[in-house]
Amino acid sequence: MNSFQETRDQTSKWNVSCSQRAKNTFNPIRNFVQNMAVKPNPEKSPIRLSVGDPTEFGNLVIPRQAVNQLSENILSGKYNGYTMSFGTLEARKAIADYFSSRECPIQPQDVLLTCGTAGAIELILSAIGDEGKVLLVPKPGFPLFQTIASSLGMKTKSYRLKQEDNWQVDLTDLASQVDVDTVAIIVNNPSNPCGSVYTKQHLQDILNVAEKCKVPIIADEVYANMCFDGIPFYSVASQSRNVPVISLGSISKLFAAPGWRLGWLIVHDRHHILLNAGVVQCLHQLTMRMLVPSSPIQSVVPTLFSEPCRKEQSLIIEQLEHNANTAYPLLKNIPGLRCTKPQGALYMFIHLDLNILSFENDVEFTESLWKEESVFVIPGSCFGWNGAVRIVLNAPGPIITEACHRIQSFCERHLCLA
Ligand SMILES: *Cc1c(COP(=O)(O)O)cnc(C)c1O
């Protein structure tokens, strides 16, 4: 027996414990949705405008041709093997071509495939963020950045978005948050939960801050091109001359296929700053842990980005635009609510005036709305912003209308009359 075995006998405890990494992992949206104890009103059909899943109502569908291609590819038996750890050339080329522009050319070798955008966030943070390092995230913002960062032992600090200014970045606040430990700034455009889309000028202003501070930008562009009313989408990378940008995306929202778990990371590194720091090499090394996404899903990427599928994709965006244009006028004049018109993405973020609504906070508002009106929304506090709620615009138009009417009568019933 070795000394380890000697010190253990039948009566001693099993050598099992939890990792600090696991204990540090917490996703507030999932936690809220999965643990909601309040029951909806049995008299009213439940309307769940809570999780940002485009497939929730069945009205937004993945392009048919991609589904046919997938089943054909699976039946062919040709896609059962491993691929390169960072994805097949065909899939990376289709993504590079789709996102390339004259001012921002992308080569297949700049693209790495991941398990959704979530996988891309995990990949880049693992590559650049040691324990104790700091990631700057928007507030309000999608909480997954924090979830993954803290699970890796990193810290997050937030910079403010200005509600009064269409949720643009407070540039002064952003600049003041950067310190020696800051490894990157997250920019999420179009924004979850705000539904805002940044102008070219605003992106340049953000890039100027990053350039002064010499901090790269991680651009979560999972809603790239999902803009309404003719508002153009500009990627952060397309506006950057000197700042290295890592842009992230997936087919989850773009093609209504979050369950397919196909995402990507694109390295924009004009001056070889990331390359010379070894980051590109590290990214490739890290992909060798997992080998994702699955080969059959990779095999349909060229089909997804082909012309017919992109046409169908534009129908998804049209429906979301229609929903935004339905919900905004119905909600904007409700006493106690303050809304900004969604410009893109999948969401509307609604400020609650808790001086005139009889609720302590947004969680209480959300629970009562579910209990009385069977409408499920997510409290702003899940996005680091108290006193707001987020609704998802993924339902068919008539359901969105019904939800807005219910929210209206709910708010009218709960006004505190001074
Ligand atoms: C939905 C979402 C993600 C995660 O998307 P997947 O590609 O399904 O992992 C990441 N970032 C934002 C802002 C999102 O809204």
Image (tube, grey):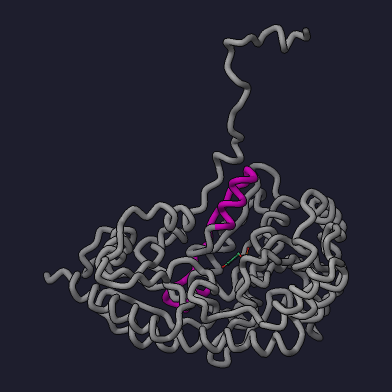
Q: Quadrant of residue 356?
A: bottom left
Indicate the quadrant where residue 72 lies: bottom right
- Give the quadrant of the C terminus: bottom left
Numbered disc total: 0
Horizontal side of residue 52 vs 189, given as left or right: left
Q: Would residue 148 be counted in the magenta stretch?
A: yes
- Residue found at the far bottom of this picture: 230
Q: Is residue 80 above or below residue 107?
A: above
| Rendering quadrant holding ligand 1 | bottom right
Q: Is residue 205 magenta?
A: no
Say whether residue 277 is visible: no
Relative placement, left or right, of 105 versus 256 is: right
The residue shown at (74%, 73%) is 71
Q: Residue at x 63, y 78 (%)?
A: 62
Which residue is pictured at 84% across the width and 51% down the height?
Answer: 285
**Is 12 on the left or on the right of 193, as rendered?**
right
Q: Residue at x 33, y 85 (%)?
A: 330
Q: Residue 172: x percent and y percent?
A: 54, 66
Quadrant of image for the N terminus: top right
Could you tell whether 384 is left or right of 73 in the image? Answer: left
As drawn, 11 above or below 113: above
Q: Look at the image and give the residue range highlighted in magenta.
A: 144-168
Could you tell me residue 289's position as x and y percent? 79, 48
Q: Position of residue 393 (x, y in %)?
A: 46, 78
Q: Position of residue 134 (x, y in %)?
A: 62, 50
In front of the other: 130 or 367:
367
